[in-house]
Amino acid sequence: MDFGDSPEEAAFRLGLRDWLRDNNPRLPASSTSDEYWAGHAAWHQALYDAGFFGLSWPTAIGGHGRPSVYEAIVDDELAAAGAPPRPHLGYLVQGILEHGSDDLQRRFLPGIVNGRDRWCQGFSEPDAGSDLASLRTRAEPDGDEYVITGHKIWTSNSDVADWCLLLARTHPDLPRHEGLSAFAVSMHQPGIEQRPIRMINGITSEFGEVLFDGARVPATNMIGRPGEGWKLAMTVVSHEREPGELGYVARYRKLVHELTAAVRQQPDHYGPEQRRELGWAIVEAEMLRLHVCRRLSDRLDGITHGPEGSIDKLLMTAVEQAVGHAALAVGGVAHGADPGGGDLGGGDDHAWLAVYLYSRAQSVMGGTSQIQRNLVATRILGMPAS
Amino acid sequence: MDVRLSPEQRALRDSAAQVVERWGPHAVGQLDDTERRAKLDAAVAAAGWRELRAAADEDGTPWASGVEVGIVAEELGRGLADVAFLGPTLAAELRRLAGAPPAPAPETVALVSDLSALAATVDGALPPRTVALDAQGSSTALVLVPVPAAGGLSIGQVAVDRGPALAPARVDLTRPVVDVDAAVTVEALPHQDRVLTGTVLTRWTALGLAAACADLVGTMRGAVQLTSDYARERRQYGRPIGSFQAVQHLLADAHVSTEGSRSAALHAAWAVDALEPTDAVAAAALAKAYCARAARAVCETAIQVHGGIGNTWECLAHVHLRRALLSTAVLGGVGPSLARVLDHHGISDGTGDGTGDAPGGERGLR
């Protein structure tokens, strides 16, 4: 049992630290600013090109085939340098790795991993949120293609995406979980309309709605077998609940460092209440770092995604919202410090307020906290179904 | 990095779990079974778990790391083991740090009245209301004695008088805290090779906090297990109460904060020997703040889900809560631990307790 670095891990850590000294894009916090999302692709590509992204993924898709715990080292160093977190698209990679044919993996995964192809995930719909299996977007066969009709929402990065991992109903006559299939759909075609969604902190770049009206996808772009869509979706959302997959530890620790620096710089401005909120944010963020070390270590026995992901999602949510409360306490509502030092993004709200407001979404996105609690109680603690 | 337990550590965990399963209390009524308790104590003594931190080599290296101490503490906490472990472990640590030989007879440590620190004499006298921690079986307790000429502290020893009626009046029904007679003579512990410095004692504090965290994690795990079993069995409205989402969500939250606590406590146990003392104690304080806050909520949930029965003496839920309250108070609870975290990050507000509303150790204890 060792939280410390092996010699090889220590050497890797120093290499990354050196690289970050000259290559930190100094983007604002991801949750506060459209400027962050604009610089996101360049950051992904730079991190990949330098050899610091996809550490634990197979080399065949552009990964490095290293033990899973290297991801924790990357998160440590990114946070320490105040750099942006690593791109959080591991769940798409895991879904295609587990369900896609060799051919599809070869065609799509290198582009996702190296950041040259940008992807979004078309799962949720206006009437299919927590109850995802009720989704109504149709994919109807037409020759060797499928024709897509439907309405997706909460689609991250849909404004810049080249591809969409789409979940659609291909077999309307089958029971609802069995009639779904997954596709890689090109976003560059007629029949797709993208609309940005303005979130409560003012950002417009992260989430969008996507309307499919006669968009087409080759049948060969189906990921998994016909009817395997639900299984793929469960693989994807399981990984989407894991902070170790998402790299969010770096995001929280970066914010905590910035809040701590603000209090240190102007100690007279902050009273016990604000310091206590920040203290809890420090405690929570560190707990999540350690928890991710534990989970990534468990993965050394092989990748798993069981119901434990719901525990991790709830812990991650508690951390994000504790950091949000610290940002609110330290930033205040009128004259808060600006962590980005520049464009505050999100209209008139200052940056710390934007961090706080954004944090409320964490208990909804990727599966609400209420759904996660249902899963922990029934799948882990063995409670009878309600 | 690989934070999985080694095969040896898993074997230690399984062994501790087996001892507690065999000889630990499984009902409140069994707490009075002195024969059972003697067998539990004998099993712990035979396993040598109280000597994990006693010196093993000439150079004073302990038998085992903080991780092994944490593994045993967690299993003892999980099974509400009514046997001394924390006190004797901390006494052995203190002896080793001072280069003193292992204790010839069972021994514990004496803490100040709210349990937040090791007791130290002032002008030769103990602080008022000094108590012996985890006093079951121990006839002596260790305290600190300032040695101004040497710029540090040495170890003193006091007799512990275990009054027969004391234990049930204390918060923890499984680990008695006993008053040390204010008039007792503090004897110098013989054969001390080294004066204890602040840095050395910081490492000792890290071990104490880490072991208390592990016990809290175990106590939480036991409480969640006890309560989950009850929620599957107990029926109202014609179905198990565990089928109601309102109950499910209480249990889910309890399990989730137990898992978060476990990750923090594991790191604290590792840090005892792997990090510099100031970083080790900071890691331990951070874990203590998290675990102690979680433990009270988890044990309160255990009482709530048990309903009326949960508020009776006969239900084990309050035994978990009481044990958690004692472990919380040992070397500082939520408020003092959070204050240590703020201090470590250079954002303390200078009052010594940056939290404004530290939950009082004493209020929970007496």
Image (spheres, coloured by chain):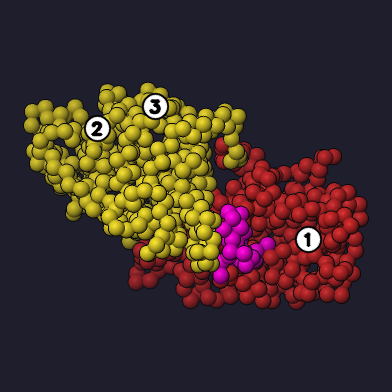
Give the label, 2 or 3, closer to the camera: 3
Return the residue nearer the eye: A353 or B281. Answer: A353
Tell me the chain of label 1: B
Task: Residue B182: give x, y in percent of width and height.
Answer: 83, 75
Q: Mark 1 packing: few (<14 Cα in 10 Å), some, or many (20+)?
A: many
Task: Residue A253: give x, y in percent of width and height.
Answer: 48, 48
**Chain letter corresponding to the colour yellow:** A
Q: Residue at x 65, y 69 (%)?
A: B172
What's the magenta region?
Answer: B329-356
Screen quadrant of the N terminus of chain B: top right
Q: Mark 3 packing: few (<14 Cα in 10 Å), some, or many (20+)?
A: few
Residue under label 1:
B108
Have a look at marks 2 and 1 and say if they share a chain: no
Q: CA distance from mark 3 to mark 1?
A: 58 Å
In the image, which disc is placed on residue A223? 2
The answer to which of marks 2 and 3 sits earlier in the sequence is 3
Q: Identity of the amino acid at label 1? A: Thr
Tell me the chain of label 3: A
Whether residue A336 appears in magenta in the rendering, the answer is no
In the image, which disc is placed on residue A49? 3
